[in-house]
Image: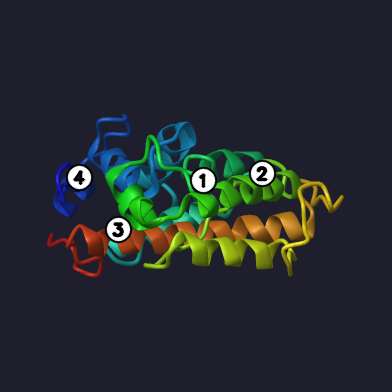
Amino acid sequence: MAGQPILPSLSEIYASRDTTRDGPLALAFATLFEPSYPLFEFLVPTVVATIDGANPGSQTPRRSYNALIDTAIYELEKWPHGQQASFLGGHPRIGEIKGLSALSASEQAAHATPPEVLERLVVLNEEYERRYPGLRYITFVNGRSRKMIMLEMEEKLGIVDDSWVKGDSEEVHEVGSGEWVSEARRALQDIGHIAKSRLAALKVDGDQEVED
């Protein structure tokens, strides 16, 4: 694919302690997770410290791309709720067709989506974000069409027929509630699945370990 990103090598990542936006880990995570302020300011420094052994309780057992992704998700799950929401907001909404990274555009299959499905997704995204304040609906597309994701979103929101219209439900899961926390955790896990899928799309073996 034209414009497809190239990931830094594992040797570069594990040999570097650079926590800036131009460092090898930041460049890799910006591709695998999508760039965002909390990624650069909080996640990258934390994972660099883990690689360096400065976080004894968060050791990376293997030195591979999959291990880096697993470590990132593990750290993200410990973040405060607002910080988690800000990180998740770095991913594009389902159905967006402008301003997408090359990998996001490929995953969402923008050119194969009927306009009525895109219009429905706009409404569903708004409803989801109303019910889960601060969150954005994220799912591991895994080759599925946007129409299939639309149906998944409707199921998540309890929409069972075409009679539903925006504003029918007053249900809201406040930040920090059990439902909100569960949904944030699910989204973070899917972020990990997406990142590993991107490794495959870039023809990178996520299990290959860097040599000392």
Indicate which disc, 2 or 4, sits on the residue closer to the N terminus.
Answer: 4
Report the residue marked by disc 1: 93
Q: Is residue 152 left or right of residue 191?
A: right
Q: Quadrant of residue 26?
A: top left
Whether 42 is drawn above or below 51: the answer is above
Are the residues at dot 2 and dot 4 in contact (C-beta closer than 8 Å)? no
Q: Is label 1 in contact with label 2 (beta carbons under 8 Å)?
A: no
SS at mark 3 in the image: helix
Please tell me which of labels 1 and 4 falls first in the chain: 4
Q: Position of residue 193 (x, y in %)?
A: 41, 64
Marks 1, 4: nearer the viewer: 1
- Give the number of the mark in front: 3 or 2: 2
Q: Is residue 188 above or below residue 105?
A: below
Task: Tell which circle, 1 or 2, labels the residue nearer the N-terminal end.
Answer: 1
Residue 45 in the figure: left or right of residue 199: right
What is the C-alpha distance between the residues marked 3 and 4?
10 Å
Badge number at residue 5: 4
Above or below, 124 relative to 179 = above
Residue carrying label 3: 198
- Rendered location of residue 163, percent (x, y): 78, 61
Rounded to the nearest angstrom, the CA distance separating label 2 from label 4 is: 31 Å
Mark carried by residue 126 = 2
Task: Name the residue: 42% across, 55% down.
Answer: 113
Choose the circle earlier in sequence order: 3 or 2.
2
Marks 1/3: CA distance? 17 Å
Q: Are marks 3 and 2 in contact (CB under 8 Å)?
A: no
Q: Secondary structure at mark 4?
A: loop
